[in-house]
Amino acid sequence: MKRLTLGLISLSLATAQLFAAQSGVPVKLTTKSNGKEIPGFLQGVEKGKLIFQKPGKDKNIPLPQNKISKLTFLSKSKERPLINQELLNTYFSKGEYSSLITEFDVVFAPYWDYMAIENNLQQPFLKLVDSYLHKKSFDKVKRAGEILIKSSNKDLLLKGQIYIAMAELSNVDTNGVVLPASVKIVQKIQENIPAVAGELYLQACIDRAKGNQKAAFSNLCTIIVAHGNDMRWMPDAELLCAYLYLDSHLTNSAIGVAKQVKSIYGGSNVAVDADLILKEIAVAQVEAKKEKIRADKASKASKAALEKRVRNIAPTKRPKEKTKTSVTKTKPSKVVGQEAKKN
C-alpha cells in the first residue's frame, strides 16, 4: 500500500512537471457532443480550428471551434492563479483604465485567439477591451471585435460588432470628420443589429462622428422616448447624451445627465463612465479658475508695469519758464511836443 501511494505521488509529480514544461496554453476542453472534458495545450488557431496537443504529446490535433462548448484555462502553477481578478475588477470599477491595461495587457496576450469560445477569462477580457476603448487604443479594440464576431454566442457577437463600429468611427480626416469608407462599414453593421434601439444608437454614433450633434440628439431622444424599456441600449444612449453636451460646450447639461446616469445605473460600467465625466469637468473647472486667477494677476502686473514706464518717461519737474523782457514805450515829452509846435 505504501509503495502504491509513493508510486501515485511520483506519477502526480511527473505529470505536473510535464504539464509545466510543455509549450502552449494549458486548458481543459469541454466538447459539445458529450460534455467530455479533455486536458491539454492549445497551440493556436488555424482556419477556424483549434490546434490542440494532449499532455506529453507533440502531435497537433485540429479541432473545429464549433465542436467545443467551453474552454477552461488552467495555470501551470497551482500556487499562482491565472489572473488577479480582484485587482482587475477594482481598477475597472474605479475607471482606472490605464492601470488596468498596464497590469493585464501582457497577461491576456496568450488568450486572445480563443475568446470567441466561452471560457473562464471571457468577462475579464471584455473589461480589458473596454479599457482599450476608453484609452482610444482602437487597433486592439478592432482586433478584439474581429475575434468576437466569430462567436456562436449572440451577446459576444453583438459585442464584437460594436467594438468594430467604434474602432471604425475613430478613422477621421484632417477636419476630424469620420471617413466615408468607415461610415459604410458601420452602416453595414447597423443593418445586422437585432434591436431598433441598437440601430438608432449606432446612427447617433455616426452622426456624432460626422459632427452633426443635432441629428445625434434626435436619435438618442427617440431611444429614450420610444424604447425606454430596452435596457441593453438605454444606459449607453443616456451616457452618450452627456458626451454630446460636452461636445456642444453645454457643461451644466452634461453634469445634469451624468449625475442622473450615475444615480440610475449605479454599479454598472456606464455609471463609472458618468462619474469620470463629472470628475473631468470638475478638474477642468478648477484649472479654468486657476487660469483666470493667473490671468488676473498677469493683467494687474502688466498694468502696474505700464504705469511705471509712464512715470519714468514723464519729467519729474516742469522746466522754469523764461521771463520775457518787457519793452517800455516812452511817451513823447510834452516839452518836445511843444518845441515842435513852436517851430
Image: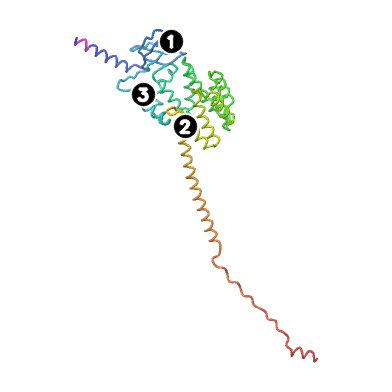
User: The residue tagged with tag 1: helix, strand or loop?
Assistant: helix
Tell us which disc is closer to us: 1 or 2: 2
Q: Which mark sits nearer the N-terminus, 3 or 2? A: 3
Determine the CA span between mark 1 and mark 2.
Answer: 41 Å
Task: Indicate which disc residue 274 carries.
Answer: 2
The amino acid type found where label 3 is placed reads Ile
Q: Quadrant of residue 28?
A: top left
Determine the CA span between mark 1 and mark 3.
Answer: 27 Å
Residue 7 location, x and y as percent? 23, 11
Q: Which residues are magenta?
A: 2-6
- Please name the residue that numbered disc 1 is placed on: 67
3 inside magenta stretch: yes
Q: Main secondary structure of the magenta part?
A: helix
Does 57 sit above or below residue 195?
Answer: above
Quarter of the picture holding the C terminus: bottom right
The amino acid type found where label 1 is placed reads Lys
Front residue of 147/242: it is: 242
Residue 6 location, x and y as percent? 21, 12
The amino acid type found where label 2 is placed reads Ala
Residue 184 location, x and y as percent? 58, 22
Q: Which mark sits nearer the N-terminus, 1 or 2? A: 1
How many labels, in total? 3
Residue at image position (45%, 33%) is: 276
User: The residue tagged with tag 3: helix, strand or loop?
Assistant: loop
Residue 215 location, x and y as percent? 59, 29
Residue at image position (19%, 9%) is: 1
Instruction: Please report contact status of discs 3 and 2: CB closer than 8 Å, yes or no.
Output: no
- Please name the residue that numbered disc 3 is placed on: 83
